[in-house]
Amino acid sequence: MNTKYSSLALTMKTLNSKFFGKTNLNRWQHLQNYDPTWDERTKLIVSLIPKDTRIIEFGAGRRQLELYLDKSCVYFPSDLVSRGSETIVCDLNVRPLPSLTNLQLDIAVFGGVLEYIRDPYTLCTWLSQQVSICIVSYICAKSQPGTLGRLQETISRIRVGWVNTYSKKELESLFKTGGFPHLEKVTGETSYGKEEIFIFKK
């Protein structure tokens, strides 16, 4: 079943996520709603992952990251619903978040996920206790906070299901104060345009 929404229905579900922390489970539990073109971003992310590392992918979806990883890596999928063996079922909008220290993780991957998180700051502080590196794709806002442009961008993002709005500077500050003071950025070309990947390190 491919779950389609009218613009109004998606906006209402996004506002529910933004203000009440209710993740749009009905949308994301169906693998048909994961666009295969996102695999290009996944391949870009994989190129940044060192060998012999232990990785958790949040929003694992179709588990394409696992297919491209070097065989020396250990992969753990995490999503809102089970995606097969060893899936860690976790809603990143629900608090408290579980401890994953027993997995001895090195890297957390967020490919097209952070835009849907209501409270990224507490997510970052939690992640700093679980991993030493976060690899994140994020479509950044171009406007300054408190401006009409920011309001317009926020509304546009809500219409596509995104619940937060950060510029590059704000995103970097978020992870820095959350426990990841070091940053690298990589920009790759995909069929749908440039994709910027942030590598946040402790």
Image (cartoon, rainbow, N blue to C red):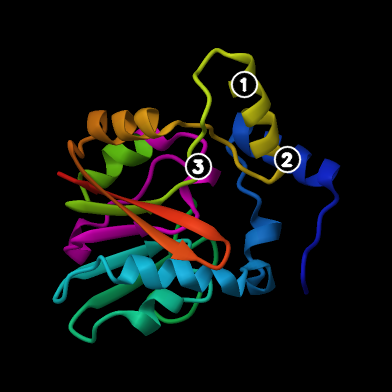
Instruction: Kindly identify the residue that appears in the image at 28 percent across and 52 percent down.
Output: 134
Numbered label tally: 3
Name the mark on residue 149.
Answer: 1
What amino acid does circle 2 point to? Arg
Indicate which disc, 1 or 2, sits on the residue closer to the N terminus: 1
Q: Name the residue under label 3.
A: 117
Camera-nearest label, 1 or 2: 1
Instruction: Kindly identify the residue that appears in the image at 77 percent across and 38 percent down.
Output: 12
Image spot of residue 79 (x, y percent): 48, 63
What amino acid does circle 3 point to? Ile
Which quadrant: the N terminus? bottom right
Instruction: Kindly identify the residue that appears in the image at 17 percent across and 70 percent down.
Output: 50
What amino acid does circle 1 point to? Gly
Residue 88 in sight from this viewpoint: no
Furthest residue to the bottom?
Answer: 71
Label 3 crowd (10 A; few <14 / some 14-19 / many >=20): many
Image spot of residue 53 (x, y percent): 17, 71
Q: In this view, does 151 lie to the left or right of 38?
A: right
Quick check: is 116 in the magenta stretch? yes
Camera-nearest label, 1 or 3: 1
Q: In this view, does 124 lie above or below 196?
A: above
Secondary structure under tag 1 reads helix
In front of the other: 104 or 178: 178
Label 2 crowd (10 A; few <14 / some 14-19 / many >=20): many
Q: Is residue 107 left or right of residue 42?
A: left
Indicate which disc, 3 or 2, sits on the residue closer to the N terminus: 3
Secondary structure under tag 2 reads helix
- The answer to whether marks 1 and 2 mark residues whose Cβ atoms lie closer than 8 Å is no
Magenta region, residue range:
93-121
Quadrant housing residue 101: bottom left
Quick check: is 94 in the magenta stretch? yes
